[in-house]
Image (cartoon, rainbow, N blue to C red):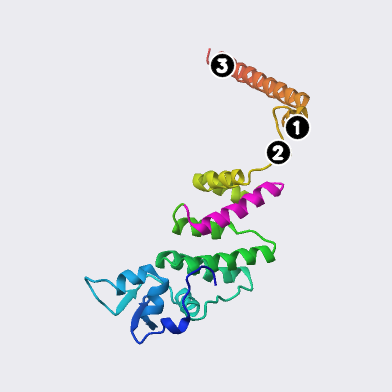
């Protein structure tokens, strides 16, 4: 488990219990108050409040599956290992829950699980996953940082940008800016970065002068021929009217 200042589990299993009701079905969880509040400032403010002492709390907007995984982590300090990409959905939902509940240890543990899955599967985060995280987190989110740095590497190393990524980057300016910032964070040695200012080959690759000249000449000729054709048709129409 990540983080410091951890206390033995037996010291946190006090007699005081709290009732948590999760989701639209009000799934009932009975949890150890001290254990829950030790890890989460969010719950600490709820159950240790001097103005409104309570022993129950509802989370109607949360899903059952990630909360169940959270409870498992709370008592075991471990998370399930995803076997395929579809399993990451639970981890992302759990991560958002960790941010809401203000639990740095859980944030770090989920980050590690997600990062290791992409590393060992030799893959990168999908656009769908990144859009989901961006829609539900604020700037400075550790998960945002990890995902966008992974995508920045993909963009730099791949030969082209997939069409759906191209469209997304044009639409989501913040994501594009974050990718640029991620690349800047690498502090690349200037010797390995191509410099278009002093490399003649770079300019030659951008435009084929002969081909571009021929193309423009053809376009001009077609426009002239088209204009002449329209003018002749207009003259013929005028003659017919006379």
- Mark 1 = which residue? 205
**Closer to the camera, 64 or 216?**
64
Instruction: Check the image and report above or below for 10 versus 183.
Output: below
Q: Taking the image as drawn, is residue 162 in sight?
A: no
The local secondary structure at tag 2 comes to: loop
C-alpha distance separating marks 2 and 3: 68 Å
- Mark 3 = which residue? 240
Q: Pick out the residue farthest to the left.
A: 51
- Image-based side of 167 in relation to 201, left or right: left
Q: Which mark is residue 193?
A: 2
Q: Is residue 146 magenta?
A: yes
Residue 95 point in image, percent of width and height = 49, 66
The local secondary structure at tag 1 comes to: helix
Instruction: Check the image and report above or below for 28 versus 60.
Output: below
The local secondary structure at tag 3 comes to: helix
Q: Residue at x 76, y 27 (%)?
A: 200
- Image-based side of 74 in relation to 84, left or right: left
Crowding at label 3, few (<14), some or many (≥20) Cα neighbours within 10 Å? few
- Magenta stretch in the rendered image: 140-160
């Amino acid at each position: 488990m990540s983080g410091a200042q951890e206390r033995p589990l037996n010291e946190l299993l006090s007699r005081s219990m709290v009732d948590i009701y999760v989701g639209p079905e009000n799934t009932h969880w009975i949890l150890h108050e001290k254990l829950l509040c030790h890890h989460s400032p969010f719950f600490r403010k709820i159950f240790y409040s001097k103005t409104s002492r309570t022993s129950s709390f509802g989370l109607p907007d949360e899903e059952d599956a990630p909360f169940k995984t959270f409870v498992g982590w709370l008592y075991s300090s471990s998370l399930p290992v995803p076997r395929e990409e579809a399993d990451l959905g639970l981890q992302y939902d759990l991560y958002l829950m960790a941010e809401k509940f203000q639990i740095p240890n859980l944030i770090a543990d989920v980050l590690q699980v997600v990062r290791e899955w992409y590393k060992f599967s030799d893959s990168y985060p999908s656009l769908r996953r990144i859009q989901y995280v961006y829609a539900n987190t604020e700037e400075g989110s550790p998960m945002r940082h990890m995902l966008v740095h992974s995508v920045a590497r993909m963009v730099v190393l791949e030969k082209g940008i997939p069409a759906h990524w191209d469209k997304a980057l044009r639409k989501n300016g913040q994501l594009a800016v974050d990718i640029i910032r991620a690349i800047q964070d690498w502090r690349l040695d200037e010797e390995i970065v191509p410099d278009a200012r002093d490399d003649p080959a770079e300019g030659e690759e951008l435009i084929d002068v002969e081909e571009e000249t021929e193309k423009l000449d053809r376009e001009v000729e077609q426009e002239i021929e088209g204009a002449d054709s329209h003018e002749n048709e207009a003259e013929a129409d005028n003659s017919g009217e006379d």
